[in-house]
Image (tube, helix red, strand yellow):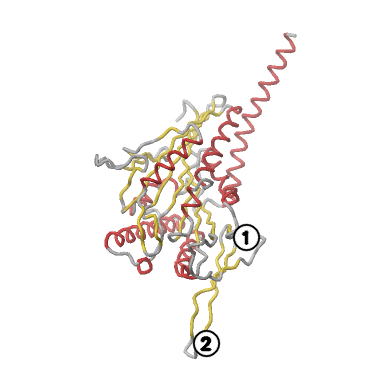
Amino acid sequence: MEARLREALAAAEEARQKLVKEETERRVLFNKYQELKGNIRVMCRVRPSTDDDRSEQAGISYPDEKTSAEILLAGPEERSSLGVVSRKNYPFEFDRVFTPAVKNEEIFGEISQLVQSALDGYNVCIFCYGQTGSGKTYTMSSEDGMIPRATHMIYDTITKLKEKSWEYTMEGSFVEVYNEELNDLLTPNDGSGRRLEIRHDDSRKQTNIVNCKTVQLKSASSVEEILDEAQKNRSVAATKANERSSRSHSVFILKLVGENAATGERCEGTLNLVDLAGSERLKHSQAEGDRMRETQNINKSLSCLGDVIEALGRGSSHIPYRNSKLTHLLQYSLGGNSKTLMFVMVSPMETHLKETLTSLRFATKVHNTHIGTAKATKKMKGGD
């Protein structure tokens, strides 16, 4: 009996070692597969029309059903000198185009691989870009949005990885960039005047925000609590473009640290889920006073984001991260050591046509950018 017990224990230990080894190999192969798909991807989502939409639908079609990668927009009506009315068609192509019928569950299916990359020790940035009212906050922060789905997936994966000797800790913080100032969305503004400061650790490729509240996330329900808290504190104001318009960029930051007792491996990954402020042109939003200043700051930071991505694509020696608070904050999640996914959100309404074209052109500029190869933040215990 003792001999059989020893054999069974030896077989169990051998099986466990095999599991650990297979997980290490999976990480290497999974990352190679991700690199083939590209370290910067752009996807387009067209929101469904709602009861509040009072204009007619724009002419939007999806030419290639097989790849689901194309969107065709019928431009505004143009009248020639002879009175002939015509419309120009504008074709766009991205990594994936989601029609109005697609639910959040299918969209998360596309980004879940990047969430896995964050667990594997990579810096990941997923952001929603588009005009006010195009569905950015719904996609990111609704009950079945990307943030709740990502955290549920992380908890499930962490539980499964325990049998492969991985132990993880996860902490979250939630900030907004409003008028080029950084605010903590998990701490109501108590007038204490404590400024948030961005500190970068270049060796670890990690960012720390001084004076920012960080919450240890031990359950999926704790994430829902901080989402509610953040929503209450977020800067929201009315513009002519939308009655309830988010006037700030919100950034949900998940830091994931994993340690493997069997192999001595340690990895640090960061998942940034970013809901950008509405990208209205000043003329369209008819903003005045404070609203005008907000719109100018929003557009400046979005323009800086485009400049950073363009500089990365050119392989420029200087990347202008410091030109805006948003890009400075996301510095290690937009460069060559990271993976980036941009959702361009589109309204289906004719009245929003010019804004939609502007959004799709910006997204095309990002889509045509190729950045370097991502590197994981990993080390062996006791090593450098």
Mark 1–mark 2 distance (CA, rounded to whole Å) = 34 Å
Query: Looking at numbered disc 2 in the image, what kind of residue is underneath it?
Result: Val
Q: Is residue 366 above or below residue 108?
A: below
| Quadrant (top left, top right, bottom left, bottom right) of the N terminus | top right
Camera-side mark, 1 or 2: 2
Task: List x then y, in percent, for residue 303.
Answer: 38, 60
User: Residue 196's x, y, as percent?
Assistant: 30, 42
In the picture of the structure, the residue carrying the numbered disc 2 is 84
Q: Quadrant of the C terminus?
A: top left
Name the residue rendered at 52%, 65% in the picture. 348
Residue at 65 percent across and 29 percent down: it is 19
Disc marking residue 68: 1
Of 332 and 289, nearer the camera is: 289
Instruction: Please tell me which residue is depicted at 43% across the width and 42% down the height of the picture.
Output: 228
Farthest residue to the bottom: give it.
82
Q: Secondary structure at mark 2?
A: loop
In this image, 59 relative to 127: left or right?
right
Instruction: Give the structural element (helix, strand or loop) at label 1.
Output: loop
- State which tag comes first along the sequence, 1 or 2: 1
Residue in front for this viewpoint, 311 or 162: 162
**Type of amino acid at the residue the image marks with label 1:** Ser
Depicted 82 relative to depicted 57: above or below: below
| Residue 122, placed above or below residue 341 | above
Which residue shows up at 53% across the image and 28% down it? 167
Q: Which is more toward the observer, 193 or 40?
A: 193
Q: Position of residue 242 (x, y in %)?
A: 41, 61
